Image: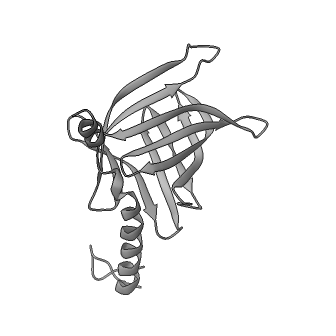
Amino acid sequence: MGPSRADPNRQVGVFAPNVVAAVSAARAAEIERFRWIVGEWNYENLVPQTRLSPAYTDIGRQRFAITEDGWVSMVSPDDRQHRCLTFDPFSGQWIYVLTRGSYGMLRSKQGWAGQQITFVGLMTMIGVECEWRMTWTKISETEFRFVNEERTAEGAWVYIDEWHFRSSLSAESTSR
């Protein structure tokens, strides 16, 4: 217990400064594991045929940044940052948050295993709730991908789509 920042006459629960420092340091160290993602990437989203739509490939560019408060963010063309990935040092879990178009919070309890990290959780997409699994693979400093899967009622994971990212800097240097 200690004095409230808003009203020093009120006693509230507070963290010991050494605990806060250790938690902040742990989060910062984990976020560094995603430092390679900062920059601009060209992507291909490969979507297989379904009973409702033909197969297609979407292409585009995506920028990523890391915020001062410990989030990996997607950066939109108007330079707004949309937080999507962070590390919770209290639970020791990575968190992936969906807040645009699809909504949900996926967690990675095991974290990075080699060059992969897998997030699992509930997601709502176009009004449909499902259990989702997203597996990221860092192929190199200039290439990564993630695969999305959905859990069926029987408990099996079914492939949805995959995203391939290549650093726009590496694409520019190979085209010269």
Residue 115: x percent and y percent?
51, 56
Residue shown at 72% from the left, 34% from the top:
152
Residue 69: x percent and y percent?
30, 62
Left or right: 81 in relation to 112: left
Colouring used for the render: one colour
Residue placed most toward the observer, 17 or 25: 25
In the displayed structure, 35 sits above or below 6; it is: above
Can the viewer see residue 39? Answer: yes
In the displayed structure, 17 sits above or below 33; it is: below
Quarter of the image holding residue 33?
Answer: bottom left
Residue placed most toward the observer, 55 or 167: 167
Residue shown at 60% from the left, 13% from the top:
52
Can the viewer see residue 14? Answer: no
Residue located farthest toward the right when viewing the structure as drawn: 154
Residue shown at 42% from the left, 23% from the top:
58
Residue 149: x percent and y percent?
61, 37
Residue 9: x percent and y percent?
29, 83
Residue placed most toward the observer, 128 or 9: 128
In the displayed structure, 7 sits above or below 83; it is: below
